[in-house]
Amino acid sequence: MGILFDPTSGLVAEMIRATAVRHRILASNLANVETPGYQAQEATFSSALAEAQGHGARGTGLPFSVGVVLKPDPEAPPRRDGNNVDLDRQMVKLAQNTIWHTALIQILTSRLSMMKAAVRERG
């Protein structure tokens, strides 16, 4: 395993990918807020993250693959037209996902900056 592909950086990169997928799902829900019969989708990856962390802890290393599970949103109450997208709930989920995504990018950027500084010191 190379220095650029340590388990933590690999996991962070996979989580960035997963939050990007979740962002697209939430945006699709918002785009269909007025579509009769549309069922809101939820993208989860917490169980996949726990499994990936477990593999890393056991030393199986990379590549991590954090699978995103797509399922109907169980908490969304249906309206008369069959649509169950709640605009407020979706906006809160989108904001939370954006915070996670931004934080993960900052973590990865920080890790890469530390590696860059270490290379400069040795060179």
Image (cartoon, rainbow, N blue to C red):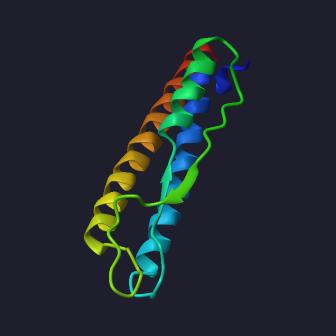
Of residue 19 and residue 90, the one placed in the foreground of this image is 90
In the displayed structure, would residue 26 be above or below residue 103?
below
User: Residue 113 location, x and y as percent?
Assistant: 50, 31
Tell which residue pokes out farthest to the left in this image.
88
User: Residue 49 location, x and y as percent?
Assistant: 53, 33
In the displayed structure, would residue 35 be above or below residue 59?
below
In the displayed structure, would residue 5 be above or below residue 38?
above
Residue at the image position 45 percent from the left and 81 percent from the top: 32
Count how many numbered circles sit on residues in the image: 0
Residue at the image position 61 percent from the left and 39 percent from the top: 66
User: Residue 72 location, x and y as percent?
Assistant: 49, 62
In the displayed structure, would residue 26 be above or below residue 71?
below
Residue at the image position 39 percent from the left and 81 percent from the top: 33
Quarter of the image for residue 57 reads top right
Q: Taking 88 as reference, is 25 left or right? A: right
Of residue 50 and residue 107, the one placed in the foreground of this image is 50
Of residue 13 and residue 45, the one placed in the foreground of this image is 45
Q: Is residue 93 visible?
A: yes
Residue at the image position 61 percent from the left and 19 percent from the top: 56
Q: Is residue 116 visible?
A: no
Tell me the quadrant of the picture where the C terminus can be found: top right
User: Residue 48 location, x and y as percent?
Assistant: 56, 36
Q: Taking 115 as reference, is 61 left or right? A: right
Q: Taking 105 as reference, is 59 left or right? A: right
Quarter of the image for residue 121 reads top right
Tell me the quadrant of the picture where the N terminus can be found: top right
Of residue 66 and residue 5, the one placed in the foreground of this image is 66
